[in-house]
Amino acid sequence: MEKNVSKSRTWNESELADTFNLNSLLDPSPLLQEWLTIEAIQQIENEVYFDKLHLKLRKNFGYWNEQELELFFIAPLISTFVDYDSPHFMLYSEREISATVEGVFLKTEADLLLAKGKGEVLKVPYFCFHEYKRTKKASSDPVAQVLEAMLIAQEMNKNGKPIYGAYVIGKDWYFMVLEGKEYCISKAYQATIRTELLEIIAILRKFRVILETTLI
């Protein structure tokens, strides 16, 4: 495939895999397995609010657009039940990141990034989160958007460490790991099922442990 160093473009997953010789693993890698190995949350704090949030998603996920899903569910879920406050990393929203990877210019806007940074300056991305779509369409491929952000993060970091990510399609959450040229994607976790929403929270919390112990 011809490389273009001057323009960004819209990619799909297959094009990224072909251009950058990526291998999609059918089974979870050890890193993904470790991330998804969690202790069940037996009792959630702010349970009344949790149940209201869960009910709101069940009623509306089929109707919300991406901004509404982010505003009314994902943002309050993360801000209330997942603690990412730290002097060592920050959450960034709707940030454009870009890099030239193997001679190909990549640019995307990340819905959410967890990264080392200072103020507005984003330095080392660890976790790339996309995309609040009701359905996966050919014109908007959330896997490709996460994968593109991960490739950019690899190039920005230049430290050989894996990049973690996630994407949402309506009620379904998927978790990803890119290590070198290999990436894998978890099964779907359905946020409309209470036990699986608790698993989603536990997985997001587990990433902080991974970040603080192996990535920073």
Image (cartoon, rainbow, N blue to C red):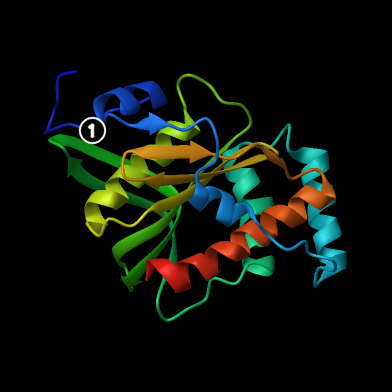
Q: Splitting the image into 4 quarters, where does residue 101 fall?
A: top left
Q: Is residue 101 left or right of residue 181?
A: left
**Does residue 24 appear in the picture of this structure?**
yes
Give the answer, above or below, for where 214 lies relative to 101: below
In the image, what residue type sits under mark 1? Ser
Crowd tier of the residue under label 1, counting other residues whose Cα lies within 10 Å: few below 14, some 14–19, many 20 or above: some
Q: Is residue 137 left or right of residue 146?
A: right
Q: Is residue 90 above or below residue 23?
A: below
Q: Is residue 113 left or right of residue 199?
A: left
161 up-or-down from 193: above or below: below
Task: Locate the N terminus by quadrant.
Answer: top left
| SS category of the residue bearing label 1 | loop
Residue 90 visible, this angle: no
The structure residue drawn at horizontal position 38% and vertical position 38%, both measured from the top left corner, is 182
As rendered, which of 98 and 16 lies closer to the eye?
16
Residue drawn where x is 41% and y is 36% of the image = 145
**Residue at image mark 1:** 8
Which residue is at the front of the view, 186 or 48? 186
The C terminus: image quadrant = bottom left
Residue 192: x and y in percent read 79, 43
Determine the residue positioned at 31% across, 45% down.
Answer: 180
How many callouts does the rendering have?
1
Residue in the picture at 23% in, 55% down = 156
Spot occupied by residue 27 in the image (x, y as percentages of width and height) = 55, 35
83 or 111: nearer the viewer: 83
Q: Residue furthest front?
A: 30
Query: Which x, y percent locates residue 181?
Result: 32, 39
Residue 201 picture location, percent across and down = 68, 59
Q: Quadrant of residue 48?
A: bottom right
